Amino acid sequence: MTEILIKNGFVFDPINKIDCQKMDIAIKDGKIVKKVSESNAKIIDVSGLTVMAGGVDIHSHIAGSEVNLGRLIRPDDHVKDVVKKTALTRSGTGYSIPTTYVTGYRYSKMGYTTVMNPSMAAMKAKHAHEELNDIPLIDKASFTLLGDWWFALENIAKGDFKECARLVAWMIRSTRSYAIKIVNPGGLESWGFGRNVHSLDDEVPNFCLTPRDIIIGMAKVNTMLNMPHTIHLHTNNLGVPGNYKTTIDTMRALESVYQGDKPIGHITHIQFSSFAGDNWAHFKSGAEEIANYLNAHNHMTVDIGQITFADTTTMTADGPFEFALYELGGHNKWVNSDVETESSGGIIPFHFKRKNAVNAIQWSIGLELSLLIKDPWKWFMTTDHPNGGPFFHYPRVFAWLYSRKAREATLKNCNKKAQKKSLLPSIDREYTLYELAIVTRAGTAKALGLKNKGHLGIGADADVSIYNINPETTDIANTYKSVRKAFGNAVYTIKDGEIVVKDAEIVATPSGRTMWLDVQTKEPCRINDEMKRKFKEYWTIEFDNYPVTDHYIKVPEKISIKASV
Amino acid sequence: MTKVIGSVVCTICGCLCDDLEVTVENNEIIKMKNGCAVCEAKMVHGYKSEERILKPHIRKNGKLVPVTIDEAIHEAAQILTDAKYPLLFGWTSSASETQHVGVELAEELGSALDNCCSVCHGPSVMATQEIGIPTATLGQIRHRADLIIYWACNPWSSHPRHVERYTAFTEGRFEKSEFKEYVQKLKAKASQKKVAAAIRRTQVRYQSPSRPKSALVEAPPQTLAKEGRKMVVFDVMKTMTAEVADYFVQVEPNRDYEIFGALRCLVNDQELDVDTVGGVPVDYLKEIADVMVNAEFGAIFFGLGLTQSIGRFRNVELAIALTRDLNRKTKFVVSPMRGHFNVTGANTVFAWQTGYPFALDFSQGYPQYNPGEFTAIDLLRRGDNDATLVISADPGAHFPKGALQNMLKYPLITINPDWNAISRLGDVVFPTQWCGIEQAGTAYRMDSVAITLKKVVEAPKGVPSDEEIVRRILEEVRVIKAKKTATDAADGNVSQEMVGSKKRRSKSIEKEMY
Amino acid sequence: MITITPKRAFTVQIQATCINVDVFTGKTIQDIKNLPITEGKETITLNDAFNITENKTVETPNITLTGDFSKVKRIGQGMKTGEIVINGDVGMHTGEKLSGGKIIVNGNSGGWTGSEMKKGLIEVHGNSGDYTASPYRGTSTGMRGGLIIVYGNVGTDVGCYMQGGLIRINGSAGRYLGYHMLGGTIYVEKDCAIRVGACMTGGKIIINGTVELLMPTFTVDSIKPKVKIDATQTAQGPFYVFLGDIAERGTGKIFALKATNPTCSSYEKYL
């Protein structure tokens, strides 16, 4: 492997507390090393440019059955955004849900090198992995939907967390996944008969337990298994006015499991769970309450799910939410896709408009949260791609974070009612590049427990992104447009020590790795005849044909974890 | 040496039953458990066909002669590169790994790319693109559905284990199997028949009164309001599935759309200005609408009777709209009865690489999609393409004459395991392995759940997998293109010779066929 | 005026988005000859496939196409001004997304003619194909304005998701005329096949001939002596007026001539 020396850049590496230091980064064999000999190494002079670790996205729906169904129903969306084949790259289409190859290229052009695919139905895991194999240039991992899995529900209801943990470990291994994803706990099971749960203490029909039990139970399981990431939680009542109370209830419920060291839960796309007001007419922001709670507590992390005002496609495993959204009217397509014994799903194409009061307030909520949560290590930047907006709109979100001027420019064009209700004019905070590096790479890598990602210390993966921003001479808040452009067009992206993007052009297309956890429990889950019989009853696939085999993972990175059960 | 292999996946229909138990002796499947008759026909007997292609062939002077694989690959690649606008068609009986390479080949060639779904459930996909689809995996239906509607399909014959594995005759967590009731019903029917026969025998001397000629459709039976699973069949004729059902509604051909429309109104509590719709009295439809609304969980399965009769994707669109309306009152899902075992896979694989499920065109360097414009039959009937590659499909047996005639005017490459109609007409004929018997891979069930196909026996010596063939053609195409670019650069002009040297097929083959 | 004639008969599709007055404007004849088009997968110049001549004395029409253009697609796509006359058949997507100007086809035109059109005029003197004035797959915004006149018959699915403008068909119409229509007017001089106006929620369809079969999801509203086609034209009735599609809670109107639709008399009892 070649050696690379990145010279004279301004380095932002929050994990190693490096804030805008002019220093060299040496790369050898795909890792950051102390030094390389200048005569052997390829030298990249990046004087006057910003150097960061490759971006780490904690939540972006890039592959899987749901995502592909979203692609499939939107020819109208693809025809607007076509990508030609080149000698090196494959063709494809966008817009809101780009095809696999285009997803890889576009992430790489923004300097992102690791992306988490946060919603994978276990039964459809093979499909997700087949797609992930076709996404080049980025490392990826998937989270398995386990919050409404019958085996888990039954064991939590019984109070047998140990057995539940063993089963979860088996499932994580069998689906080659990285974390536990919980979506509207209890709600998806209820949706099996067209119902939903509306608070933490509603009973889940047929299972004698409540969403609260599921959340706490899974958090316990997560701790028992020593998972690198926390439970990844999509709250109950998502997308319902007044739901910020449920969100705070959820966070409060998890306080009991907190052991005082590291966060115990992650609430994803919290913007959609921070609504106040009793109904859509009185819709307003609950951002302040959520932010205050988070500022006072340390057991949670969140990501935002920022709205970017785009004609996008919403998709989530939260089937009942999508149906409620459909019932609001104005949509021509609605997809629901239930998965037996596990999960559900829904898709609706959705155009977030500036002139729509609710949409504009949602946009404001996202930014209010981002700016009011004081500690950037507690929250991370996402658009919940493609729900809030496609991932290649991230630079726009960055601009809103680091530039008050950018926020004002957008707010000016928003719905008048929303403008009045927005807290944004009262917030002066502007993110620094250092803080931006936290919410896009360092913090996410830390929250995900990815030790070799999100920083440029020795031994880290040589994933580096270099942007045409001179922090010494640029007033980023005032020249937000050029900085925004720079974030969208990396000068260099280096993936595992290989230059993959140069001047915003793809110059190499290596496959990224798929990370998965091999959670080793002290005693393995009892795969006996009893379980096999249950398996046959619960699923329509044979036990032997269920697990994802090595065949489905092109470049695997197995991470072994020792569980405490 | 005998071995028994369990959890083998059947490669017939979209059900992808994966509980087969196969006994292999001397590299031959000799016995099978759990499979349906159709499955057994292929997986125990059919695949051993004497019509198996064992060597690549090229047509020379009107006769197919065996050649080496290298020669065939080169010839195929040459044909495809020379053509201005080739069409790659088929793919649905291949593993998704093969389909995956297929998209890359089409992209490299700038060709049209279509799969068999354009002649089966393509319209279902198009309907989904118009209004989405509320659907579920088959297990969800197995556990919960208390109303199962088969519309314009006959699973008893086309998907023989569908009812038994996923719907009425299967034990779910919340809904029980109706198989026992069915057996009782059968017995009752048989004894009724016996009684009737006895009466007939005694009364043979008397003129039995002729039954009054009633409408085609019987009134909904009382049992439709019973607890437990119910099965209703809508079709244009009384099929075996209809015999099994609790209620059968005979629809006038090509009037499904009107019935869906009427049902939508009735489900939404609206009145109609007509008395019958599609041959069914509105009063009956009202009762059916009631049954639908009162179901805990309903499921509609529809087949080619909707997608390939007048209206095509619009029929499906309204079936989906009805399901959507019903979701305001209860829980309802709708699902197409996909035919070929991996036709869903073809849609899936094409979609993640290009955004579109079938009817693709790469002539502009990026994927374009438009059924009617780039679908195989439409292209062929207009005579828009000038070379064809057919893989794991038999348009020779199924395409309309006009389309086939145009196809045969130009070079044809086929990749199929046996000498079917299209292989016999090919100019370059590849042998290949039986996917799911001699070749492992991935297939997608009708509810788009990926299942791994197993390799159970070894393929005959020298017969490659279709994935390998397509991959090698792709490599060869790249080599030819690179050479061509090099010579063009050397000559300094683009030679038009290629166009002139295009091989027209000898008329004798066309005669051979018609 | 630029005159374009094919040099040879074409086998494979030709995509010629560049045959468009907006593109030609300000270009010399040599520039025009060098414009790229694709024949199948191959990119060629306009001159490779067509003879192109210029007649500086004639201003309108700006482009005249003479010959068989039935394999040539996307002529006049997105055009804003000017006039194209086609003497012969023309392929698919002619005048797609037209936002001004005029396209006259003295022959038949292919599918998706005037698809998603916004303004301007398309005149087809022969028949027009399926999906005339209908949007692309999965799109729910159809024709928004302008005028399409077809002197012959039209295929199926004409005027889907139409929101405004007028389609005047002097022949007969195929199935699903005005499917999911939201606004605008369609006038059919002769007969109309089944499922006319299915799922429509607005707009009007006037049928001066026989309706093969009306969807059961329409309810009779009244009988009107005449109906306005546009500001200047009126169709003489009496017409049955049907409202629908009630399954979509729509308020679209179908006007079916009483004289030619005796089967509709069964609805009279509800009046």
Image (cartoon, coloured by chain):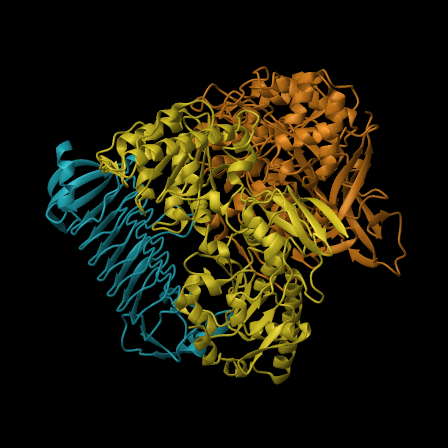
Quadrant of the rendering where the N terminus of chain C is positioned: bottom left
Residue A138: where, in percent of width, then height? Answer: 70, 48
Residue shown at 24% from the left, 37% from the top:
B205
**What chain is colored cyan?**
C
Q: Percent position (x, y) of residue A431?
A: 66, 35
Residue A322 percent location from the top left of the image: 50, 32
Residue at image position (72%, 46%) is B4
Q: Position of residue B43 (x, y in %)?
A: 61, 52
Q: Nearer the viewer, residue B50 or C169?
A: B50
The C terminus of chain C sits in image quarter: top left
Q: Name the side, left or right, on which A417 lies relative to B162.
A: left
Rendered image quadrant of residue B189: top left
Colour of chain B in the rendered structure image: yellow
Front in this rendered view, residue B143 or B206: B206
Tell me which chain appears orange.
A
Q: Residue at x 61, y 75 (%)?
A: B75
